[in-house]
């Protein structure tokens, strides 16, 4: 009972810590998140005056027209996946009016950005108060003097005490910026991360770093503290009080010290028998800091964790002295309908879904992400590889290199305290030329060495890494080569051999990026029929042009069917092999969630990379459950085919029914008849032996599985139709309103032959259209949220918001008569 009470107290305190992390900004005592009362203009202005001049209805100077928005907000919320246009790259303006109420008599008023894309300028009325280059690191603008000057000016009277703020964001193409516009992800524009107004005393802390060190016997922990003050013309003494609390809320150390504000602060505190942080038990300590001066008090709350790790040469990864296979994935800041403007709740849902899949590691590709993301990784127990966006294109001039150094410095300084981070990555695919006429390997090596040294100077306790630049593999601590066996090159059965060969070429090996595209809802009875000619002698790395859907040698990415079926088989094989690779540090599947990319306009969903195990709206694909079956500890079972309504074949043909589960055994029932119990064995491919050959007859069938793990019993069931009729040439598009709910209609288009037999292998591209009162719910980058999409098994779905009116809906495909229906 005592132990249970301790667990409950720990969980309550951990929740308290997480809530503090969400709602507390560690750089200010008073802060207000600015979400409402913003206006946006998706173009440039002649000058900032056009954003603040007096408004008169009907006067020419009242245009252009601004639209009301809430933050976070992204220029490219929809057009990033619009099949008919290139996404907008250019300037945009935001404006608002703020009530300033600084509680400190002579304090400073700051505007804090968690990130804004990609070049940003900030104005108070017509005075430029700051600017920033780079879309992903945090930065702050001091508005204090400009606000004071504005309030003394005659212009302030017409704003009735409010302060006009104007912000110009610009994501225009620029080869002297990172990431390169050759990068395989959308370089979004806008205020797509949180913006806050912050009030701090005239004397306040700039940074406060916590460096917890624990000896390998785990008996003694040491906490090194360092702090610096913001630049201040004031000279005096400050009283700094520090208290440290363990994960259960017990104070375990404290100190108080008086020091001159112009000096940096360093201290070290001992912690007996430190409680270790790990993915299965992410225990966080809390540091409470109180700075007292004559200018006012500033308080901060910082969380940290004790853990130690090691990458064994040519061997595995150790955390807290024990081997841990890093089971990872990647994420982009990208979401259906909002682009990069994810809310905290969206981010939380995504990370909880990852954790439930069994992930213990994440690569934050390919740029610094928000503090909220890192707080979640700390509290959920996800080890982190975080990366600066030196991504493709080659190497630019001194401005380019200065930005890379600055972004690396900011990333490390801003995220230093997070126990989840173990790897600072210096770049991705930096061997990929194209932005400049010259391409020099020696220059890239020299600059990478510069970044590597800088990283170790700023943080000696973490390792450095890059992915895919073979001629630089010896520079960093950890290297990830390109291994895409079974997709861009080779076949997936080459995976283990290729990985071992690469491991032997470097001291510390990690496999980031592997996988296959899977269009949600597309399935195959035989996903291998068109890929028999793929070479197994030309390596397994991704080469230039392999992402193209045409040209080049035979490869699955070009010749395969992009079905969920194949995606599941490849993932299943990789995970099976990883169980028998004792030297493997770990891997990270590319990618957790489908995302937008300007480089893939011809994909089945235009401008979308569909390698995710969930869609852009977090709808899981079948492959999500393959990962769960290997990585999740909570008992689960899943019959393959929840999004596969119709299978096909001959009457009485035996079909494989696959079940993914982490349970010891499972029993399958088809139409209430048992087909026996199978024992799970991860090396019995596919589906760890949980598969049955069942003869099917034409018509509807009910499938149910009951699985057991210890005393826990779980089950799953689906209904599928089995089609035995053979189809001919596709010739007709049929429309069906599947459902109407909350004034929204779900519409299915089917491609049939002349006899109305569904063409189940059809992949024709279709275009949905709408005229009238309704709105097509498209440009979401999902298989059921795109007005132009390749069909999945002869069908495609989209939704229409009816707006309580009448509309004409259409679906068209090349060579097929267009079909219409009235809604």
Image (spheres, rainbow, N blue to C red):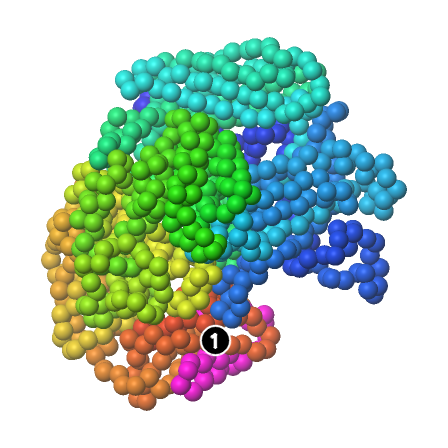
Up-down relation of residue 144 to residue 188 (above or below): above
Tell whether 120 sits left or right of 137: right
Q: Is residue 815 magenta?
A: yes
- Most prominent secondary structure in the magenta stretch? strand
Residue lying at 59% horizontally and 70% vertically, measured from the top left: 803
For mark 1, what is the residue?
768
Asked which quadrant contains residue 705, the reply is bottom left
Which of the pair 760/581 is nearer the observer? 581
Tell whether 480 sits left or right of 104: left
Image coords of residue 458 (percent x, y):
46, 28
Number of on-image labels: 1
> Which portion, as a residue range, is magenta?
798-823
| Residue 96 visible in the current orientation | yes
Q: Quadrant of the N terminus?
A: top left
Which of the pair 8/445 is nearer the observer? 445
Q: Is residue 184 magenta?
A: no
Asked which quadrant contains residue 717, the reply is bottom left
């Amino acid at each position: 009972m005592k132990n249970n009470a301790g667990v409950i107290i720990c969980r309550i305190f951990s929740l308290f810590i997480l809530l503090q992390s969400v709602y507390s900004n560690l750089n200010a005592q008073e802060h207000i998140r600015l979400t409402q009362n913003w206006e946006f203009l998706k173009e440039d202005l002649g000058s900032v005056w056009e954003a603040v001049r007096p408004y008169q209805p009907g006067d020419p100077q009242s245009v252009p027209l601004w639209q009301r928005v809430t933050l976070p907000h992204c220029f490219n919320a929809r057009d990033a996946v619009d099949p008919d246009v290139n996404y907008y790259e250019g300037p945009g303006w935001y404006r608002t009016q703020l009530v300033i109420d600084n509680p400190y008599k002579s304090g400073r008023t700051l505007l804090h950005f968690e990130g804004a894309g990609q070049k940003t300028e900030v104005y108070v009325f017509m005075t430029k108060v700051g600017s920033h280059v780079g879309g992903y690191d945090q930065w702050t603008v001091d508005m204090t003097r400009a606000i004071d000057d504005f309030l003394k000016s005659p212009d302030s009277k017409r704003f009735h005490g409010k302060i006009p703020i104007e912000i110009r964001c610009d994501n225009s193409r620029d080869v002297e910026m990172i990431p390169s516009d050759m990068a395989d992800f959308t370089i979004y524009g806008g205020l797509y991360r949180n913006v806050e107004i912050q009030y701090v005393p005239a004397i306040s802390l700039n940074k406060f770093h916590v460096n917890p060190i624990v000896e390998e016997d785990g008996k003694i922990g040491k906490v090194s503290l360092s702090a610096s003050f913001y630049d201040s013309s004031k000279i005096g003494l400050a009283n700094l009080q520090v208290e440290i609390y363990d994960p259960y809320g017990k104070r375990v150390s404290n100190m108080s010290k008086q020091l001159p504000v112009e000096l940096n602060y360093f201290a070290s505190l001992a912690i007996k028998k430190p409680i270790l942080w790990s993915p299965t038990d992410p225990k966080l300590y809390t540091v409470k800091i109180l700075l007292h001066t004559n200018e006012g008090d500033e308080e901060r709350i910082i969380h940290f964790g004790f853990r130690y790790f090691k990458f064994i040469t040519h061997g595995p990864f150790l955390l807290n002295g024990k081997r841990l296979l890093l089971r990872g994935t990647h994420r982009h800041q990208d979401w259906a309908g909002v682009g990069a403007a994810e809310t905290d709740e969206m981010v939380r849902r995504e990370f909880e879904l990852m954790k439930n899949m069994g992930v213990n590691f994440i690569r934050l590709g390919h740029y610094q992400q928000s503090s909220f993301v890192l707080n979640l990784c700390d509290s959920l127990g996800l080890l982190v590889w975080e990366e600066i966006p030196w991504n493709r294109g080659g190497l630019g001039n001194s401005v380019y290199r200065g930005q890379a150094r600055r972004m690396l410095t900011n990333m490390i300084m801003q995220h230093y305290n997070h126990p989840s981070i173990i790897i600072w990555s210096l770049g991705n695919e930096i061997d990929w030329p194209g932005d400049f006429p010259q391409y020099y390997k020696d220059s890239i090596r020299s600059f990478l060495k510069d970044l590597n040294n800088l990283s170790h100077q700023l943080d000696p306790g973490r390792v450095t890494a890059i992915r895919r630049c073979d001629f630089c593999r010896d520079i960093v601590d950890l290297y990830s080569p390109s291994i895409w066996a079974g997709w861009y090159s080779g076949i997936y059965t080459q995976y283990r051999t290729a990985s071992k060969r690469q491991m032997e070429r470097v001291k510390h090996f990690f496999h980031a990026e592997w996988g296959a595209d899977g269009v949600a809802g597309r399935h195959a009875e035989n996903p291998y029929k068109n890929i028999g000619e793929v070479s197994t002698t030309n390596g397994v790395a991704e080469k230039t042009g392999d992402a193209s859907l045409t040209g080049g040698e035979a490869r699955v990415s070009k010749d395969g069917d992009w079905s969920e079926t194949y995606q599941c088989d490849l993932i299943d094989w990789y995970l099976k092999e990883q169980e028998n690779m004792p030297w493997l540090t770990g891997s990270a599947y590319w990618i957790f969630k489908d995302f937008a990319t300007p480089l893939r306009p011809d994909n089945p969903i235009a401008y979308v990379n569909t390698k995710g195990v969930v869609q852009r709206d977090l709808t899981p694909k079948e492959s999500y459950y393959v990962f769960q079956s290997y990585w999740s500890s909570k008992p689960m079972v899943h019959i393959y085919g929840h999004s596969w309504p119709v299978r096909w074949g001959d009457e009485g043909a035996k079909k494989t029914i696959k079940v993914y589960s982490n349970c010891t055994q499972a029993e399958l029932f088809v139409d209430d008849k048992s087909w026996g119990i199978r024992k799970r064995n991860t090396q019995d491919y596919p589906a760890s032996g949980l598969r049955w050959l069942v003869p099917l007859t034409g018509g509807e069938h009910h499938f149910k599985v009951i699985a057991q793990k210890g005393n826990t019993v779980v089950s799953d069931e689906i209904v599928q139709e089995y089609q035995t009729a053979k189809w001919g040439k596709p010739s007709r598009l049929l429309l069906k309103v599947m459902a109407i709910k909350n004034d929204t209609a779900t519409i299915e288009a089917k491609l049939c032959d002349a006899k109305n037999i569904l063409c189940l292998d059809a992949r024709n591209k279709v275009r949905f259209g709408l005229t009238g009162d309704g709105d097509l719910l498209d440009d979401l980058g999902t298989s059921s949220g795109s007005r132009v999409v390749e069909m999945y098994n002869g069908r495609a779905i989209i939704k229409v918001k009816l707006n309580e009116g009448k509309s004409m809906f259409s679906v068209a495909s090349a060579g097929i008569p267009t079909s219409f229906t009235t809604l």
